[in-house]
Amino acid sequence: PSATPSATASATPSASPEPRLTISPMPTASSSPSAAPEPSETPRAASNLTETPSSTPSSSPTPQPVCIDASWVAAEHAGFEVHSRASFERVLCYGLLPCATHGHVVAHRGKLITMAELCESEQCKHDMMWVNGVQHRRSHLMPCDGAVCLTTLDGRVSSAWKRIENVIAHKLLRTHVSVIAEALTRIQLCSASREL
């Protein structure tokens, strides 16, 4: 069945003089409240990236951090971390790539998927470690292992709009235009609640 738009947008005044756009989902007959995912031994994959866009967000109230092995980030991208402090999280490890959280996005044969989705079809190891993100301005330095390339993108919110956002950001970052990378990095850092 095709999803129909069920969100309304409204301008919400904030402390700053600029209005902020807030998306408020309207209940539909097929919608149900979603609870925050609980950690489990088996990774839960995000939805297929080719899904039809829906304007109803399907995010969890407390998104999990989406990051890469903090020791690798510190060694390869010192000073370009996304978060001021690393966090200790469950990760998936594929081949020779640095380990990453379940919702971290990789490019697999040209298609953007999460680590959890990759590990459904490929052999991965599970581990726990300190993780942090890499700023978009360093996306051109992310490693590949065969047909799998690490990105600076996240899939922490499993929605069609987030997947579309990632595809657009990935294409823009692949242009290697520094002004674009800097603008996307500013958005990334604001989203991560870190001051520039």
Image (cartoon, rainbow, N blue to C red):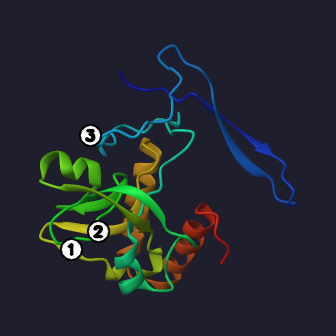
Q: Secondary structure at mark 3?
A: loop
Please report whichever mark, 1 or 3, sits nearer to the chain's N-terminal start: 3
Residue drawn at the location 63% of the way across and 66% of the way down? 190
Residue drawn at the location 68% of the way across and 73% of the way down? 195
Q: Amino acid at mark 2?
A: Leu
Residue drawn at the location 36% of the way across and 85% of the way down? 76
Is 137 positioned to the left or the right of 126 in the image? right
Q: Amino acid at mark 3?
A: Thr
Tag of residue 144: 1
Residue drawn at the location 12% of the way across and 53% of the way down? 122
Q: Quadrant of residue 153?
A: bottom left
Pointers 2 and 1 in contact (C-beta within 8 Å): yes
The one of 128 and 93 positioned closer to us in this rendering? 128
Q: Please say whether residue 114 is visible from this viewpoint.
A: no
On the rendered image, what quadrant is the N terminus found in? top left
Is 24 positioned to the left or the right of 102 in the image? right
- For disc 3, the neighbor class at 10 Å (few under 14, some 14 to 19, many from 20) is few
Q: Which residue is under mark 2?
A: 150
Q: Secondary structure at mark 2?
A: strand
- Residue 154 image position (x, y, % from top left): 42, 58
Real-space CA distance between mark 2 and mark 1, rounded to the nearest whole angstrom: 6 Å
From the viewer's perspective, is residue 77 above or below residue 192? Answer: below
From the viewer's perspective, is residue 44 above or below residue 30? Answer: below
Dot in front, 2 or 3: 3
Please report whichever mark, 2 or 1, sits nearer to the chain's N-terminal start: 1
Tag of residue 42: 3
Real-space CA distance between mark 2 and mark 3, rounded to the nearest whole angstrom: 22 Å
- Residue 57 image position (x, y, % from top left): 52, 37
Q: Amino acid at mark 1?
A: Cys
